[in-house]
Amino acid sequence: MFFIQAFSFFFGNGSGNYISRQLGTQNTKDAEVMASTGLFYTLVFSLIVMLLGWFFLEPISILLGSTPTILPYTRQYLGISLLGTPFIMGTFCINNQMRFHDSIITF
């Protein structure tokens, strides 16, 4: 989860920073393009993480400290958790983009 959250913030903060600067200069077209691009790359990366996680499910479980007794449960839990990776990463990315968007307040 730490890995997923860190990369979500990477894409969200990076694109959000650019979006904020473009909105500050009233350049909404570039801000819209960056919002879409940031989310797209987040979703592509999340699908790669999900597929690699499924492919290396057992080694990851053992690396995280799973014993042979709980390995079947760990694999099942991690497999289900990986299904939500695109949704979690997309949500975190959009959340950070919106935080940067809200920092632009015009009076």
Image (tube, rainbow, N blue to C red):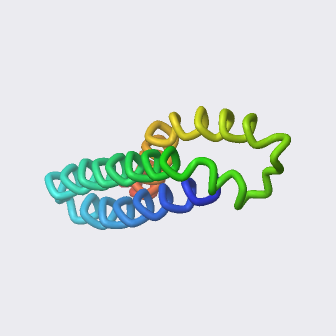
Report whether 92 appears left or right of 32: right
Is 33 drawn above or below residue 10 in the view shown?
above
Residue at 39% over, 66% down: 14
Q: Measured from the top left, where is residue 98 in percent x and y?
A: 43, 48
Q: Is residue 107 visible?
A: no
Is 63 drawn above or below residue 96 in the view shown?
below
Report whether 58 appears left or right of 95: right
Q: Measured from the top left, where is residue 95 in percent x and y?
A: 48, 46
Residue at 44% over, 41% down: 86
| Towards the viewer: 50 or 91 | 50
- Count of numbered badges drawn on the protein: 0
Report whether 18 appears left or right of 104: left
Q: Measured from the top left, where is residue 56 in percent x and y?
A: 54, 52
Is 41 drawn above or below residue 77 in the view shown?
below
Is 83 drawn above or below residue 8 in the view shown?
above
| Towards the viewer: 60 or 49 | 60
Furthest-front residue in this view:
68
Residue at 58% over, 59% down: 3
Q: Measured from the top left, where is residue 76 in percent x and y?
A: 66, 33
Report whether 44 appears left or right of 55: left
Q: Is residue 76 visible?
A: yes
| Towards the viewer: 89 or 76 | 76
Residue at 63% over, 49% down: 58
